[in-house]
Image: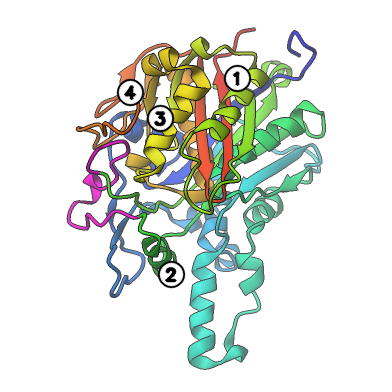
């Protein structure tokens, strides 16, 4: 319990499937070495698409984490969720005991089972509705990532899904933390999974003019906060954090990564795609997370930015930090945008970036922003960790996510002080 009588929630395990690698160690090594996961798309024939690059989880083999029969009945996003959950439990040294009633999960997804949906729709058009698989709906509904994690791992506690676009993964961490604080579970697996690197999703995002067209230079394509940015790359990933009450984690001798100290959310009520340019609605989420965590702006040593590399988004995000932390503090707070390495993983983004933020607090290493060589003068000044990682102790950090429709979510993570 904290001084205010509230349950303190900590991260004890991290599991990740992404273009940076499989598992906590591989992903963290790639992130701190500043390695890009961007490549020419290999899993799909992109046909006449103007975008042929993305951040695929190219090392992922479903059979490493589940039986072939189970994998065949899942979309790729659910496979990611199950794999990340297993990796997270292994990392935490935690086995599901008894009937699993005390263990739950919140798994975010923005798109659900897009790959199966596309293939089955094509099959219907070419060969008729009678050829559509009866597993289509169970494979594609957005909650099935959480459902499959629950079924394959035997979790019978609270199981739910958040789907607030690019903010969903951060919302999942916030929702799971709240469940533990009110005593409705003993352990929660919080995260997100999406596999939207498919021809349809690429075409749809490109129609919005938000994707980079640097097909001849995949690693150099995502350029958050750079003057020459031309959009993001779609990434695919699953990321899950094991969350437990601090007292329980100590009692079982768990290795504690960090504390999930605060969460804040707000809405822009402004535009279907573009952020509120003032940054004020999003700054309210920043201040709410700080308030929930009992932190002052000057306590924050690092911010993992949303960093979508869009023309309107990056300047707005700089204004968000200036408004949320105060200009003086914002200008000296270290920041980076890891989407420059792993791409925009949609509903998994907040979970993956939350995992990297947790590790930054634990390890005292800040992963960099790649391809930031000419900062955009339209963005207010920030202390960008550009090009190479920075070693520095971090007492408190924020991870920020801003989704289509004006959904804003921020999580605060701190070093554990007992």
Mark carried by residue 381: 4
Q: Which element type, helix, strand or loop, lies under badge 2?
A: helix
- Please determine whether, in this image, residue 32 is positioned above or below residue 164: above
Identify the disc placed on residue 318: 3
Gap between marks 2 and 4, in whole Å? 37 Å
Between the C-alphas of marks 4 and 1, the distance is 21 Å
Image coords of residue 195 (percent x, y) = 48, 57
Q: Is residue 358 visible?
A: no
Q: Are marks 2 and 1 in contact (CB under 8 Å)?
A: no
Q: Residue at x 17, y 56 (%)?
A: 216
Dot 1: within a 10 Å radius of its alpha carbon, few (fewer than 14), some, or many (20 or more) residues?
Answer: many
Segment colored magenta = 211-228
Classify the position of the C terminus by image quarter: top right
Q: Which one is earlier in the sequence, the residue at label 3 or at label 1?
A: 1
Q: Which residue is mark 1?
A: 290
Q: Secondary structure at mark 3?
A: helix
Q: Which mark is residue 200?
A: 2
* Sooner in the amino-acid sequence: mark 3 or mark 4: 3
**220 or 83, nearer to the observer:** 220
227 in the magenta segment: yes
Q: Residue at x 55, y 68 (%)?
A: 72
Distance from the alpha carbon under mark 3 to that under mark 4:
7 Å
Q: Is residue 295 left or right of residue 382?
A: right
């Amino acid at each position: 319990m904290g001084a205010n009588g509230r349950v303190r929630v900590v991260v004890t395990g991290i599991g990740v499937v992404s273009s940076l690698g499989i598992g906590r160690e591989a992903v963290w090594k790639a992130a701190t070495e500043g390695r890009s996961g961007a490549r020419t798309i290999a899993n799909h024939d992109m046909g006449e698409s103007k975008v042929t690059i993305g951040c695929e989880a190219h090392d992922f083999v479903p059979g490493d984490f589940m039986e072939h029969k189970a994998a065949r009945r899942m979309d790729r996003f659910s496979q990611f969720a199950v794999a990340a959950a297993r990796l997270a439990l292994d990392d935490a040294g935690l086995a599901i005991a008894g009937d699993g009633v005390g263990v739950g999960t919140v798994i975010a997804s923005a798109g659900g089972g897009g790959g199966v949906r596309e293939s089955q729709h094509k099959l219907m058009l070419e060969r008729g509705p009678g050829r559509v698989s009866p597993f289509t709906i169970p494979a594609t509904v957005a909650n099935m990532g959480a459902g499959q994690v629950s079924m394959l791992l035997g979790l019978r506690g609270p199981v739910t899904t958040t789907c607030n676009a690019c903010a969903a993964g951060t919302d999942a961490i916030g929702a799971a933390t709240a469940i533990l604080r009110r005593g409705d579970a003993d352990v929660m697996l919080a995260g997100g999974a999406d596999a939207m690197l498919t021809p349809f999703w690429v075409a749809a995002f490109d129609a919005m003019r938000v994707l980079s067209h640097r097909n001849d230079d995949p690693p150099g394509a995502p350029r958050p906060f750079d003057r020459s940015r031309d959009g993001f790359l779609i990434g695919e990933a699953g990321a899950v954090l094991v969350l437990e009450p601090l007292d329980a984690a100590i009692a079982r001798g768990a290795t504690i990564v960090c504390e999930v100290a605060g969460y804040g959310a707000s809405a822009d009520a402004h535009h279907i795609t573009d952020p509120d340019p003032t940054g004020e609605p999003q700054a309210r989420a920043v201040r709410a997370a700080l308030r929930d965590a009992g932190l002052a702006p000057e306590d924050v040593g690092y911010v993992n930015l949303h960093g979508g590399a869009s023309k309107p988004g990056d300047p707005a995000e700089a204004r968000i930090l200036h408004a949320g932390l105060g200009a003086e503090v914002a200008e000296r707070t270290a920041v980076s945008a890891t989407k420059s390495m792993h791409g925009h993983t949609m509903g998994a983004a907040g979970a993956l970036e939350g995992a990297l933020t947790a590790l930054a607090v634990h390890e005292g290493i800040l992963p960099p922003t790649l391809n930031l060589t000419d900062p955009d003068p339209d963005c207010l000044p920030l202390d960008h960790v550009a090009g190479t990682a920075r070693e520095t102790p971090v007492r408190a950090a924020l991870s920020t996510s801003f989704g289509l429709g004006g959904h804003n979510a921020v999580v605060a993570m701190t070093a554990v002080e007992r």
